[in-house]
Image: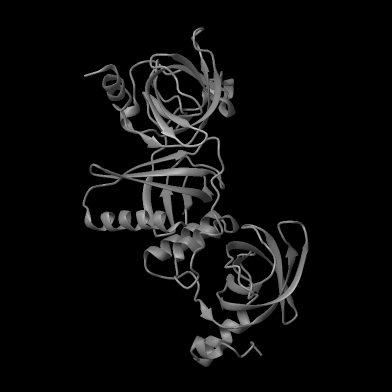
Amino acid sequence: MGPSDKSQHAIRRSSRLQLEVPVRLTSLSADFPFSEQCNTTLVNAHGCGVIAPRGISLGVRVRLEIVSAKRHTTARVAEVVPLGGDPETWLVGLELEVPGNFWGIEYAPSDWKIEDAPAPLEPRTEQEAAKPAGARRWRLTDVSSGACYLESAATFPSGTPVLVSVRIGAKEHLLDGVVRASHPQAGIGVEFMRAPEHRQRVEELIGELGGSRDVPRIFVGRKEGQQLAIDPGEARNPDSPDPLLDLVLEGELLSAEQFLSDLRAQRLGKRRDARIDIALPVLLTGVDVSGRPLDQRAMTVNISRRGALIEGIHGELAIGAALFLSRSGKKEEFRVAWVVDDDSLAGARIGVAAVDSNTEFWNEVLEATSQSGLEAAALRGSGGK
């Protein structure tokens, strides 16, 4: 076994996670001076792989720094692989001189528990030191192709990019997402990336969960140093219902009690609110992402007691943006839960949720539809008059 093989084994003796963290590498060798900004591709308790703009000699000691977290340690170069390209880049394998959870992952895999002392962190305040050092424990309670809900006493804030690792037996599923609903002492709702290949990974996980008796082991880590955006081009299909994703996207607009009540209802196969396909004209007012005012007519595709799918939107709206809908003498505030922009002349489609959980904005339409016994589809094209 050559030195490279031995070093590679050392780096791989704890579970690896695909995690992109901006780091700075600075040489500690007088014979090979450099300082470069790089990004990790894989991390574990014993080292990492980084993409570097230069080749580095094997055995060189380096200072490894996560600048955003004000954290640093030392490592040795254990592997160097040229990747080619223009400009050329290299994959550099680093072995930490002091193994441990240098990456600051709050609930790391069990085999990251190293007997050696971890790299020193920034000094903590007296208040922080007094807090119990309990690790996060996660339980996957609900999952769909677009979202999941994870129970935990300690949570991440809404908007946090996260990596979700689900291990079933010897197989690990790694999923990227963003926290959309955060409930302290309860759990978090995570929206998954919408890219087709990522959606396929989620579907594979759901299939394995349904066919396995093993209790899945869950790890959720913050994707440190970056903001994971859900690309509007990776749009969800509004014609393919995903009640869990709808609920997660509306999570910040609901109280924790209401959200968890709706989540329990979904587990029993009950929809929170009946959804009716109906075309109703509405006046939409608000401000787009560039600060320009919006004041336009649009049509609903369907409605529920607390929300609606609306089409014909001309202007870019961000998820979470506030807007007002007006119809039949009523005006009420809503927030954008999701956006589908297919670049067509017909405009974008948006899902909206009422800010007031006790809204009565659509009540008379819902009641009239229920009392008449008409099929929802028969109302389409009536203009709601």
Q: Quadrant of residue 12?
A: top left
Residue at 45% in and 47% down: 176
Left or right: 353 with respect to 292? left
Q: Quadrant of residue 80?
A: top left
Left or right: 27 with respect to 282? left
State how many labels appear.
0
Q: Quadrant of the C terminus?
A: bottom right
- The spot of residue 199 in percent (x, y) is 40, 57
- The spot of residue 285 in percent (x, y) is 74, 69
- The spot of residue 165 in percent (x, y) is 37, 43
Q: Outermost residue toward the top? A: 30
Q: Is residue 106 visible?
A: no
Left or right: 311 with respect to 41? right
- The spot of residue 96 in percent (x, y) is 40, 19
Does 247 appear above or below 174?
Answer: below
Residue at 52% in and 29% down: 38
Between 94 and 159, the residue placed more toward the observer is 94
